[in-house]
Image (spheres, helix red, strand yellow):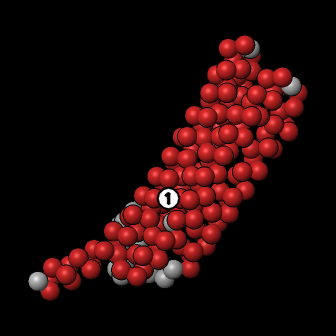
Amino acid sequence: MESIAAAMAKELGPALVVLGAALAAGFAGIGSAWGIGIANEAAAGIMTEDPGKFAKSLILLALPGTQGIYGFLVAIYALMKVGIIGGADVTVTVWQGLAIGCACLPIAITGFYSAVWQGRSSAASILMISKRPDQLGKATILPAMCETYAVLGLLISLLMLTGIKV
């Protein structure tokens, strides 16, 4: 029985890293998909009236997609840190695995929420350029403000991951 518990303890650290990486990529990716979908509804609406607004809409439509990229980057970094990607033979304790898994949470949470809100903001900006196409610069800055918190989530996740010794 003790050998089973020891084997489970040996695998629990890497499993917690995989869970954290999955949450980072998964939640940030879901938020991006949701945010892009929201912005896409507005873009499709204005293009029924004026198909020439496709390029301007596309810029605003793509903005909520960056959070998914941030979550993906954190997930890759976490998996590389423990050798799951890259093949390094690294021993990860349960506590190290828990720390790395928790370090993935800031981008998972901020990525999800900021992408959804950025999608809503992008949709409003798309509607703005439907009436005032010359205001694309201002229309781009408005949803970019939501991006700030995803970038902060990315940075804190990366800083925490960098600080964890394995």
Residue drawn 38% across the image and 70% down it: 16
Residue drawn 51% across the image and 48% down it: 29
Give the percent coordinates (x, y) of residue 115.
62, 47
Mark 1 element type: helix
Q: Tell me: 78 left or right of 160.
A: left
Q: Quadrant of the C terminus?
A: bottom left
Residue drawn 81% across the image and 27% down it: 129
Circle 1 packing at 10 Å, graded few (<14), some (14-19), many (20+), is: many
**Picture quadrant of residue 130:** top right
- The reply to whether residue 5 is visible in this rendering is yes
Q: Tell me: 159 left or right of 102.
A: right
Give the percent coordinates (x, y) of residue 55.
72, 25
Disc 1 marks a residue whose amino acid type is Ala
Give the percent coordinates (x, y) of residue 80.
44, 66
Query: Please, is residue 107 above or below residue 103 in the view?
Result: above
Residue drawn 39% across the image and 63% down it: 19
Q: Residue furthest left?
A: 1
Q: Quadrant of the N terminus?
A: bottom left
